[in-house]
Amino acid sequence: MIKPSDKLTKAFNQQIGHEMAAYLQYLAVAAYFTAETLPELAKFFFNQADEERTHAMKFLHFLLDVGAEAAIPDIKAPKPRFASAEEAVKLALKNEEKVTGQIYDLVELARGEKSLAAQRFLDWFVVEQQEEEATMSALLATLRRAGESGLLHVEDYLARQGGVLATPPAGAGEAT
Ligand SMILES: [Fe+2]
Ligand SMILES: [Fe+2]
């Protein structure tokens, strides 16, 4: 097994920080929705937060598996208050777009260093980010359609969907 370079190790450690920052930000958003008595939206963000923690763990375990040093950076405090549901979800979507850029940069780095292991590892994140952006865009579109006065419709919708806002599976709606 080839140990990643110091540069790649540092970048992966930084990504642990970004994923944990997203974890904390989604907890803050979930707390906001809980305080607003919007339990389905709160649940959605508690679940998203769990996913971000899992992402951080994946990066940490990759470093440990290849014998690289784990050095978790300072983690930025999340934004605690929001003026509206839309503002909170817009922030989440912007964050997902930012993370996608970070993952793409990591892919470039891994490619440049010919680290096949890191490239394969990152493949999962490329697909995951596509899903996360699609889910967050769908939630934002749903919120905008309902408007701030229609948040209970969003709650009903989320409850019906079981909190899943993914796009329809490939092949759905196609003629057989
Ligand atoms: Fe993530
Ligand atoms: Fe995410």
Image (cartoon, rainbow, N blue to C red):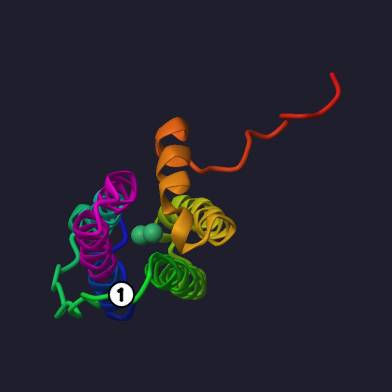
From this viewpoint, is residue 119 visible?
no
Q: Position of residue 15 (x, y in %)?
A: 30, 70
The boundaries of the magenta stretch are 21-48
Q: Is residue 162 above or below residue 77?
A: above
- Nearest the viewer among 21 and 46 is 46
Check disc 1 and report the residue beneath it: 82
What residue appears at the point 59 percent right and 57 percent down from the top-left corner? 145
Q: Residue 47's x, y, as percent? A: 29, 46
Image-based side of 60 in relation to 95, left or right: left
Which residue lies most toward the top here? 176
Q: Is 150 in front, or is 155?
A: 150
Q: Main secondary structure of the magenta part?
A: helix
Residue drawn at x 86%, y 24% as measured from the top left: 175
- Quarter in which the C terminus is drawn: top right
Where residue 136 appears, x then y in whole percent?
48, 57
Within the magenta stretch, is there residue 46? Answer: yes
Q: Residue at x 33, y 74 (%)?
A: 8
Q: Tell me the quadrant of the picture where the N terminus can be found.
A: bottom left
Is residue 111 found left or right of 115 in the rendered image?
A: right
Residue 108 visible in the displayed image = yes
Q: 93 above or below 123? A: below
Q: Bin the neighbour count of mark 1 within 10 Å (Cα to Cα): few under 14, some 14-19, many 20 and up.
A: some
The verdict on label 1 being within 8 Å of ligand 2 is no
Q: Quadrant of residue 26?
A: bottom left
Q: Which quarter of the figure has residue 60? A: bottom left
Instruction: Write down which quadrant ligand 1 falls in.
Output: bottom left
- Identified at 19% across, 59% down, the residue is 35
Q: Amino acid at mark 1?
A: Phe
- In front of the other: 56 or 63: 56
- The x and y percentages for residue 23 are 24, 62
